[in-house]
Every structure is written in C-alpha cells, then in structure tokens.
Amino acid sequence: MSLMSKKKLALFSAVVTAVGALGVSAALTVPAQAGPQKVIDLAVDNDGVVKTDVGKHGLSVGDEFIYADKLFQDGEQVGQDGSSCQVTAQDSEKITTNCVLSVQLPEGQITAQSLWTKGSDTVRMAVTGGTGAYRGATGELTCNDIQTPHETYRITLDRP
C-alpha cells in the first residue's frame, strides 16, 4: 500500500471514529422526550384509620398506621384505596413513615410508595406498578391536604 493510501485510510478512520464518538455523545446528552401522560384526579373520603402500637408504649419506630379511603370523581365513587405507613424515624414531633398505597379503580389498580413526614399536607409518591389498564405503570401520585376533608390525589402516569 502506498504512503498516500495509508494516509487516506488513517484520515478516513479518524473521521469515522470522530463521527461515531459525536453520535454517541449526542445520544447520551439529549434528554428523553416526554411522551403523552395520563392524569387522574380523585377526591378522597377518609373511611378509616387504625394505629397499631408495637414495641415501646406510645408512638415509636415500628408503629403502623392503616388507612382506607373511598375515591370520587365528579361526586361519584369510582374506587377505593388502602395504605399502610410504618414509623421509620422519630425526632421529637417529627415522625417519618414509609408508606405503601394501593388504589383500586374500574380499569385496574395502581400502587405507589414513598416516605412521608406525618403532619405535612402534601406527599409525592412514586408509582411502582399496576394491574389491568395500569399494568407496568410508572409516574407520580401526589396526595394533597392529607387527612382533611379536602384530600385529593393527582396521579400522573408516564403513558396513557
């Protein structure tokens, strides 16, 4: 192979490598395009709360709160939920709980989980899955005005 051919081959290889590297770099830095989302807004009617005191008498790590609610849209009941929150940390009046929530709707169920500081009126939960129309669901469930007559859920699913 002539010296000129070797130089052309080396230059061609360098260009191909640079273009490939730029393509990979661009693919890694371009943010994912958000697809269409599905939003479900629900009014929550607290139906019951039970506290289980375990270990040390009084509120302490390990205690559990169990919740049940009726869920409404436009004044009509469309579902129900159930959740449990275990106390994971207590610092004076600040009580942190780990909560798991299951929402049952006509099209299937949606599950969510998060930490919640008891007494705060808003919590954002990660949607961890679902059944039926919600199988494989991901997204966020925001609880507002927790444990008040104005409690609501806004469920934002990453896909319709």
Image (spheres, rainbow, N blue to C red):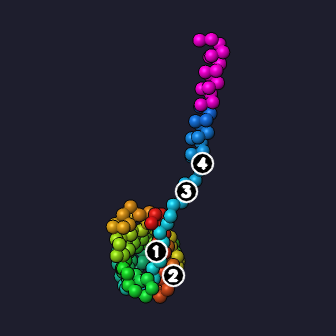
The amino acid beneath tag 4 is Thr
Q: Residues within 10 Å of mark 4 (few under 14, many from 20)?
A: few
Dot 2 falls on a residue whose secondary structure is: loop
Q: Please tell me in which quadrant of the rendered image residue 83 appears.
A: bottom left
Magenta residues (range): 1-16
Disc nearer the start of the sequence (2/4): 4
Residue at the location (65% across, 13% down)?
3
Instruction: Check disc 2 and give the amino acid type.
Output: Asp
Residue under pointer 3: 33
Tag 3: residue type? Gln
Name the disc covering residue 40, or none.
1
Q: Which residue is mark 2?
A: 145
* Contact? badges 4 and 1 (CB < 8 Å): no
Q: Residue 145, position in %: x, y?
A: 51, 81
Quadrant in which the N terminus appears? top right
**C-alpha distance separating marks 3 and 2:** 32 Å
Mark 4: which secondary structure?
A: helix
- Within 10 angstroms of label 1, few (less than 14), some, or many (20 or more) residues? few
